Each structure stands twice: as C-alpha cells, then as structure tokens.
Amino acid sequence: MANVTFSSPAMKKDLTVYAVAGDCRTLLSVAKEHKVPINFECENGECGSCQVQVVVLANKQPMGMHLTEKEKTVLKLAGKITQQQIEDAEVNDLPPPWRLACQYIVRDEDILVKF
C-alpha cells in the first residue's frame, strides 16, 4: 500500500488516500476516484494539463520509474524538467520532480502530490 497525499490551494485541506501498489493505476485515476481536483483534458499525455510535482516521503532512494516519451516532450517544452533530469531518470533511476498525473503509475512508496 502507498499513501498518496494531495496538496493544492484548490483544496480546503490536504487529502491522504491509500493506493494499492502494483495495480498499474495512474495517479490521475486515483485522484479522480477520490474527487481530487487535478486539472486534466486529454488523459493520454499530450496536452500537459495534468502536470503535478511529486515528492517521495521516505528517507531512501525514490523508486525509479521511466518517463514516457510524451512526458519527456511535454514537460521539457513546459520548462518543468531539463535534459539533465531526463538523463538522470534514464541512467541513474532518479525521477524528476514534475510528472504528468495521467502517465505516473503509483508505486509502493508514500508520495506528496502538489498541483
């Protein structure tokens, strides 16, 4: 199980929900299930409207998770990630702080999602 805490000025207070690790659900689907108001339009990684900042809440190396090609393109064009962060994700398994909620698969680690 993973604790996912959503934090946004659009919400009255932070909301922490449990997500089952390994069920291959996206962060956006978890947010929608719990009525968290993350913006989204296309739900397939092309528009970039669901950009979120993900912070791992553990004192250990974050679990590496690949960036989809759509994420690399959209987030780089938006100025949210750099080429160096893309390379660090691919080579060193260091995830960048910004992700697309529709592409991010929840893993077995507690995270804070800011949007």
Image: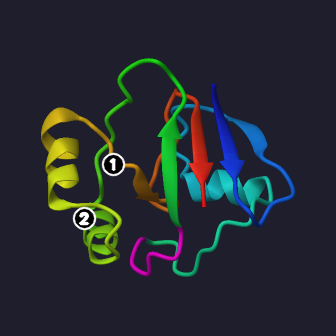
Identified by mark 2, the residue type is Glu
Secondary structure mainly formed by the magenta segment: loop
Residue at 75% x, 59% y is 36
Q: Is residue 112 magenta?
A: no
Measured as percent of width and height from the top left, residue 80 is found at: 35, 65
Instruction: Name the residue at the right extreme.
Output: 12
Q: In this figure, which residue is indicated by the disc labeled 2?
A: 69
Stretch of the chain drawn in magenta:
45-50
Identified by mark 1, the residue type is Pro
Instruction: Name the residue at the top extreme.
Output: 59
> On screen, 49 above or below 57?
below
Where is residue 64, by image quadrant?
top left
> On screen, 110 above or below 67?
above
Q: Which mark is residue 96?
A: 1
Residue at 22% x, 61% y is 82
**Distance from Cα at disc 1 to Cα at disc 2:** 14 Å
Q: Is residue 24 left or right of residue 15?
A: left
Depth check: give the residue in front, 46 or 4.
Answer: 4
Where is residue 79, by image quadrant?
bottom left
Measured as percent of width and height from the top left, residue 39 is found at: 63, 73
Number of numbered discs on residues: 2
Which quadrant of the rendered structure holds the C terminus? bottom right
Label 1 environment density (alpha carbons within 10 Å; few <14, some 14–19, many ≥20): many
Measured as percent of width and height from the top left, residue 4 is found at: 65, 39
Residue at 56% x, 48% y is 25
Q: Is residue 37 left or right of residue 57?
A: right
Which quadrant of the rendered structure holds the N terminus? top right
